[in-house]
Image (spheres, rainbow, N blue to C red):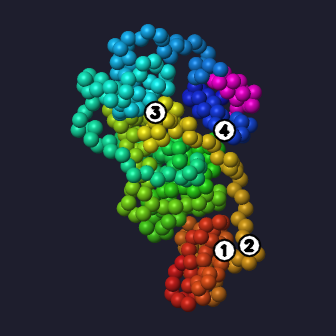
């Protein structure tokens, strides 16, 4: 099966980078990228022998030449800065190291070069302070998801960038130029990401639509679908955006490197710009929190594939199973309890706790509520 027409070079690069990770299933990866094993192994072989130049059907000039002068090195520093105006000295130096440029100066010297040529704004420089970080131990243990603030397009419409980030590796899994922030739009974008990268263990999101709302917090039809896929859910604390600190930092980077000083006519043009930048972010842009390596060096696709048909909902023989009625009500032992109406029409399982009269309510494998038989007026 041939490569998709969209961004062929980007697809080839992402494929070979992911295929180069340890313990990766090449056959599964080929299926994710919708190519044959023969094609996959061909490009992987060329990449291992020639690097990125092997992925195109044209020659590339050498990445470095002997006998470069100090002026030439300074020109290379400025060239990287001009291409990536939001990058600082450490990122620029690491990028030149990755390109195997000889005689790379220290980060302090790179910074001095940038200052000498007026590439550093002192006011902006003080804003970039290190964050206190926590990360999961392995890829796909947690994905963070959020919408970045929407912006106007040249045709008068609004673009709502949807972002999904792997917590461990900071690998950008999705940057979608959406027309709205509704559940079906997010589900369509996630379906594409799941097909390519597999399923995560958990996903972190905020409490607003489409993954939560005031009346039925924290479940919607979208999050119910995620639970059916076996994905655990966790929500950030209300009014505490730092819970999704990596997403917030990613959005700052998107603003500085993709949106600031640029304009897009429509969603298609914005998506093209997003795709081009995501390749740079995942495979070229050194990340300070990763020891100046790139996210692709730490990311591996999930071993859990996306099922095109949702698995059946099954519970244990000891569970008390009830079907959720209209408006989210369930009937249990002569009483009524209200769950989120997002579960309307689905079966849920009730399991007793060690506390007399207190039962836990599960949907698939996640606990979604508890009910108290000792207080008939209580809701779940």
**Disc 2 vs disc 1: which is toward the camera?**
2
What residue is disc 3 on?
Answer: 285
User: Closer to the N terminus: mark 2 or mark 1?
Assistant: 2
- Where is residue 226? Give x, y as percent: 60, 57
**Disc 3 vs disc 1: which is toward the camera?**
3
Towards the viewer: 333 or 293: 293
User: Closer to the N terminus: mark 3 or mark 4?
Assistant: 4
* Horizontal side of residue 252 vs 275, given as left or right: left
Q: What residue appears at the point 66 percent right and 66 percent down from the top-left corner?
A: 364
Say whether residue 333 is visible: yes
Marks 2 and 4, how far apart in space? 37 Å
**Disc 3 vs disc 4: which is toward the camera?**
4
- Please, is residue 181 above or below residue 315 in the view? above
**Disc 1 vs disc 4: which is toward the camera?**
4
State which quarter of the image contains the N terminus. top right
Marks 3 and 1, how far apart in space? 47 Å
Q: What residue appears at the point 59 percent right and 13 percent down from the top-left corner?
A: 58
What residue is disc 1 on?
Answer: 349
Which disc number belongs to residue 22?
4
Instruction: Give the residues in magenta.
Output: 34-48
């Amino acid at each position: 099966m041939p490569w998709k027409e969209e961004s062929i070079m980007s697809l080839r690069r992402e494929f070979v980078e992911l295929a180069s990770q340890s313990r990766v299933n090449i056959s599964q990866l080929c299926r994710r990228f919708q190519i044959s094993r023969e094609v996959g192994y061909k490009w992987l072989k060329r990449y291992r022998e020639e690097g990125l130049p092997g992925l195109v059907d044209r020659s590339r000039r050498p990445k470095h030449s002997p006998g470069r002068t100090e002026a030439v090195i300074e020109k290379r520093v400025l060239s990287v800065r001009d291409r990536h105006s939001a990058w600082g000295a450490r990122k620029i130096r690491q990028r030149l190291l990755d390109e195997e440029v000889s005689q790379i100066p220290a980060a302090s010297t790179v910074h001095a070069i940038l200052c000498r040529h007026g590439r550093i704004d002192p006011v902006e420089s003080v804003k970039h302070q290190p964050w206190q970080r926590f990360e999961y131990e392995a890829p796909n243990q947690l994905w963070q998801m959020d919408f970045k603030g929407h912006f106007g397009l040249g045709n008068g419409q609004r673009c709502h960038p949807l972002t999904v980030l792997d917590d461990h590796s900071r690998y950008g899994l999705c940057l979608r130029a959406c027309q709205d922030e509704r559940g079906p739009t997010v589900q369509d974008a996630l379906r594409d990401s799941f097909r390519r990268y597999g399923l995560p263990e958990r996903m972190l999101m905020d409490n607003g639509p489409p993954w939560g709302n005031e009346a039925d917090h924290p479940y919607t039809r979208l999050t119910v679908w995620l639970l059916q896929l076996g994905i655990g859910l966790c929500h950030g604390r209300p009014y505490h955006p730092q819970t999704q600190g990596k997403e917030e930092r990613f959005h700052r980077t998107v603003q500085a490197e993709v949106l600031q000083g640029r304009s897009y006519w429509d969603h298609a043009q914005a998506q093209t710009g997003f795709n081009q930048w995501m390749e740079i972010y995942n495979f070229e842009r050194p990340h300070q929190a990763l020891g100046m390596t790139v996210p692709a060096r730490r990311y591996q696709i999930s071993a859990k594939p996306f099922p095109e048909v949702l698995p059946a909902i099954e519970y244990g023989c000891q569970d008390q199973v009830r079907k959720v009625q209209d408006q989210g009500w369930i009937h249990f032992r002569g009483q009524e309890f209200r769950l989120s109406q997002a579960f309307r029409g689905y079966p849920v399982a009730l399991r007793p706790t060690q506390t007399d009269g207190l039962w836990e309510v599960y949907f698939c494998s996640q606990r979604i509520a508890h009910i108290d038989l000792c207080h008939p007026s209580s809701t779940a």
